[in-house]
Amino acid sequence: MNNWVAEAIGKINADAHRSADTHLFKLPLPRLEGVDIYLKDESTHPTGSLKHRLARSLFLYALCNGQIDEHTTIVEASSGSTAVSEAYFARMIGVPFIAVMPKSTARSKIRLIEFYCGQIHFVDSAPQMHDASVKLARDIGGYFMDQFTYAERATDWRGNNNIAESLFTQMAHEPHPIPAHLVMSAGTGGTSATLGRYIRYKGYDTALTVVDPENSVFYDSYMSGDRSLTSDASSRIEGIGRPKVEKSFQPGVIDHMIQVPDAASIATMLWLEKLIGRKTGPSTGTNLWGALQIAKSMNEAGRRGPLVTLLCDSGDRYLDTYHNPDWVRECIGNHQTFGDELETDFS
């Protein structure tokens, strides 16, 4: 291993040790007596989202596999948050970075990528990102990071302070330390793979439920067992849902899946803001909607236990989109029915 690679790995590891763990907090939901819901707040990472963990793992994986040197340009297909985090690490080790993303990506994410000295290569829609990234990397002699392929293998799911180990370590101090359910949405599928593998590795009596938005094929693939499914549509919940079954999506470690209407994701995101006084992103709404449905069923059946899901990123990145009523009305539609249901059942 040459000196530059050793220094780059050292810089990335040092950054991880400078960062405190992300906070785990319990939602105040007295109507769900005996069923506690916890959110792990991934928005507190240096780049503001869950994808900070993934980007760090992808860079270490590529460096240790001899794919990156001081002359390598990194290319990634991303709708925003992964690209923001990868731009951060690329700048840290001094290599150029290009994000291939849909034109519809939130402008705030684009500004963050540019803040970290990344460049943008736009495509018309999410299904075009992968092929455009492959071609761009080939044309410029760069390296395609390919989060959708390598997410599940780049993370050490047995531990090493991954999100699963962190979550269970924090829950160990709660009145009921073993979650009955973990609830997670899928973008690459890497986080759900890490959680599911870790649960099995440690022998926990915890079910993993993956939630999926509209216009994503993960749910249909899980239900049918067909990994060849594709869609011409793009997910309207930025950062999750895919038009094809990505290699990092591992159905064998998942216990249940729930398909979540996009309007329910937005309604839950807005409801959560009223509950905790903070804006979150739409994928957090997807996660929490799924967790609330499970919690409601547990409560009605007289079952007890905690559920944990993720607050993936801050809503500050989506002020022009998901937190803009006019944009939501045009692009998502009416979410009032779901909002009324949340108020009736949980507020």
Image (tube, grey):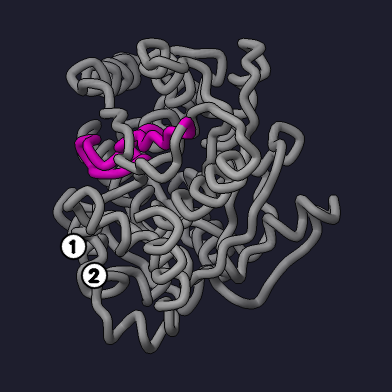
Q: Could you tell me how far apart the alpha carbons at marks 2 and 1 are, in whole angstroms?
A: 6 Å
Magenta stretch containing residue 308, yes or no?
Answer: no
Quadrant of the snapshot with the C terminus: bottom left
| Image location of residue 270, percent across then percent down | 30, 64
Image position of 327 with respect to 94: above or below: below
Mark 1 secondary-structure assignment: helix
Q: Nearer the viewer, residue 239 or 142?
A: 239
Residue 100 visible to the viewer: no
* Residue wearing tag 1: 111
Image position of 253 with respect to 18: above or below: below
Residue beneath the point at 59% across and 69% down: 214
Q: Judge from the rendering whether residue 243 lies leftward or rightward of residue 12; answer left or right.
A: right
Mark 2 secondary-structure assignment: helix
**How many neighbours does mark 2 have within 10 angstroms: few (below 14), some (14-19), or many (20 or more)?**
some
| Image location of residue 57, percent across then percent down | 43, 29
User: What amino acid is at disc 1?
Assistant: Arg
Range of residues picked out in magenta:
34-53
Choose top left, top right, bottom left or bottom right for residue 201: top right
Q: Judge from the rendering whether residue 6 lies leftward or rightward of residue 254; answer left or right.
A: left
Residue beneath the point at 32% across and 61% down: 271
User: What amino acid is at disc 2?
Assistant: Arg
Choose top left, top right, bottom left or bottom right for residue 80: bottom left
**How many neighbours does mark 1 have within 10 angstroms: few (below 14), some (14-19), or many (20 or more)?**
some
Residue beneath the point at 40% across and 53% down: 346
Residue 33 visible to the viewer: yes
Residue beneath the point at 21% across and 64% down: 108
| Image location of residue 202, percent across then percent down | 61, 11
* Residue wearing tag 2: 107
Evaluate if marks 2 and 1 touch, with contact meaning CB atoms under 8 Å apart: yes
